[in-house]
Image: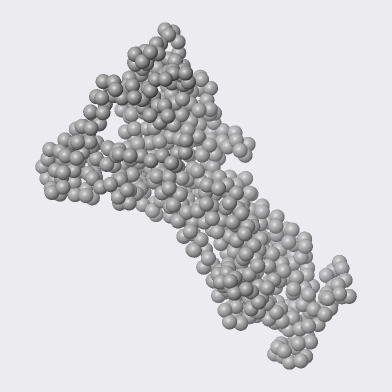
Amino acid sequence: WDKKAIKRRGDVLYDAHRPTISEVRRDASYVEQNDDVLNSMGHFTVFEYVLFAAMCKLPASQGWDKKAKKIERVDQVLRQMSLDQVKTTVLGNANVGLRGVSGGERKRVAISVGILCNPRAIFLDEPTTGLDSAMAQEVMQIVKGQLQGLETTLVVTIHQPSPVIFEMLDQLILLKAGRVIYMGPGGMEPCAHFASLGYPYRQGYNIAEFLLETLTDKGGSCNFAAEFKATERARSQLEAAESEWKAFLRLKESTRDAPGQAFHANGNPLSKAGSGHGGHEGDSGYFVVTPRGHRRTLSWVLAQEAEEKNMLYHANSQGREIWVLLRYRVAVKWRMGWFIASKLCIPILVGAVYASFFAMLPKSFFGNFMNAGMLFATVALAGFLAIAPLEDFKGEFPLILRQRQDGYYRGSSYVVEKIVQEVPFGLLGALGFAIITYFAIGLKLTPYAFFFYTLAAFVVNMVATATAFAVAANIPTIEFLPQAIINVWSTLNIMVTGFFIPQCQMPVWWKWLYWISCQQWTWSAMMLNQFGSQSGKDAVIERGDCSSTSNTGSEQCSNGIGTLMDRLPVLFQTIGFNSSARNQCVAMNDFTLQMFDLGHGAHGNQWLCLLYASLSLPVFLVLFYVGIWRSTRSRGG
């Protein structure tokens, strides 16, 4: 069935009150069926992965204020899950050929993270999926044996348990077509119930197989859900649930006019909050005290309102979250040689290709025109090269959603982590690209110009990366669509740079994009850096030692349009156009800028152009955050 079409009616109560999402995350833990989400952290060791979870989830307010205590807790959990022997083994990622722990150990790693905070209940979604019978039995025996000692309720969904695993089930709920057809003790009790309905159990037969065959009997006409609802067991369970609901209503009514008062779950008042008799002043003024003595924040608002008031429960402040993400996740990635190489090889390889095509361009107007094309290609390709970080983000997005739903960190903290992770690779990539291309092509040889060229390459790549993150975060469900949108967006930005069509000739409906395009402003900044005087003049320009031919070194272009293009600046200088130019080199550079409508107005200062380009970065980071926030909300938290 369509899970999105399912609508829940009624209320889920925690100790006779509606819980907030914070309470659910504090008291319950959920372990997914599919552990493929661990692939994006497959290069982490078992200890590093669980330690990262501990640093994110164990709050200092509950005594976990020291790192040593959290490490001790991680070691304890790994021993409980019989993982201490593989704590230094990586999780692994079969998609990239990285071998790691076995399937059963991998499942126990996921469960280890679930029990870190000593939850009151832990939910395991088909924990035996993908495991052979021996490994499945080992996982369940370890999990039940450890959690029973912690007084934690263990809820397991399982489709076809082996006889050994079925015997471990203390209580059993059977569902068919989404309806309860049995809820009660495990063992032989369900067999007795179905025998009363005309489905006798054959002695010695696998109970789990018997139940499956009974429920899937296509020839049977029994309405199992209606039959169970009519039993005394179902009626007593319904009465117990109604009793809890009435207690909630009594509590709601009795506390309505008594703020600051603490109450038992049965509605009887205690002494004033904070007086030492079980009441304690909290955010809402009081706590409710359950029959077991647990204190729970009283909440009678609707579930939606509770979520809005207390959406997330986080163990760390935002600053601490960012530090944890950088120290315990990003730092681990930075020590991986293959990860660093994958980030740097693309810009360096592209730089080598550029250098091979544009090596030692002539100092002529035709050479200037080819330089403008090279700078345009540098800016244009930045958008397409953002596909690599986009795919990296898409690979880890399921795990990020899971961790966000578990309250590991805020969405804004994750956005900061991702962009900080990309900064050193962006800087190193831009520097490597600049070193390879700048001197091989023969661009303006001044330190100022080289520094600015490197910075501009860094800015346009960071903006492209943030754009990719923003698109992928806001469209996470359709596999091909983010990449298609990035390609279309990059193409549109290329068209409005001013290289193909001057701004004055652009259609009115595209001029808005010209003024906000990061690629347009970056290309303008690079052009001013190369052909303007703000970044200084190299020795060739000072001497006026520019060629009047279009000799590229290997081919003679003087018989074609090259000579005409080279003579145009001199011709215009002769008739009084730009007569202030002192030599032919300056005339060529000035004419190059004027041809592309640069060097005046908003495009008269290269630093202002680069600033305008960088303004796109915070815009796309905000969109990135909105996408993370929306995706988490749409999945219940």
246 lies left or right of 45: left
Expressed as whole percent of the image width and height from the top left, the position of residue 218 reads 48, 20
Q: Is residue 302 above or below residue 500?
A: above
Expressed as whole percent of the image width and height from the top left, the position of residue 197 reads 36, 15
Residue farthest toward the top in the current orientation of the protein: 203
**Residue in view at x 47 percent, y 18 percent:** 219
**Residue in view at x 32 percent, y 33 percent:** 120
203 lies left or right of 231: right
Expressed as whole percent of the image width and height from the top left, the position of residue 186 reads 35, 19
Expressed as whole percent of the image width and height from the top left, the position of residue 168 reads 39, 19
Q: Quadrant of residue 299?
A: top left
Q: Is residue 122 visible?
A: yes
**Residue in view at x 51 percent, y 38 percent:** 38
> In the depicted view, which residue is nearer to us: 231 or 175?
231
Render colour scheme: one colour
Q: Quadrant of residue 454?
A: bottom right
The mark total stands at 0
Q: Is residue 212 visible?
A: no
Q: Is residue 354 above or below residue 528?
A: above
Residue farthest toward the left in the current orientation of the protein: 271
**Residue in view at x 33 percent, y 22 percent:** 228
Q: Is residue 306 above or below residue 590?
A: above
> In the depicted view, which residue is nearer to us: 99 or 595?
595
431 lies left or right of 217: right
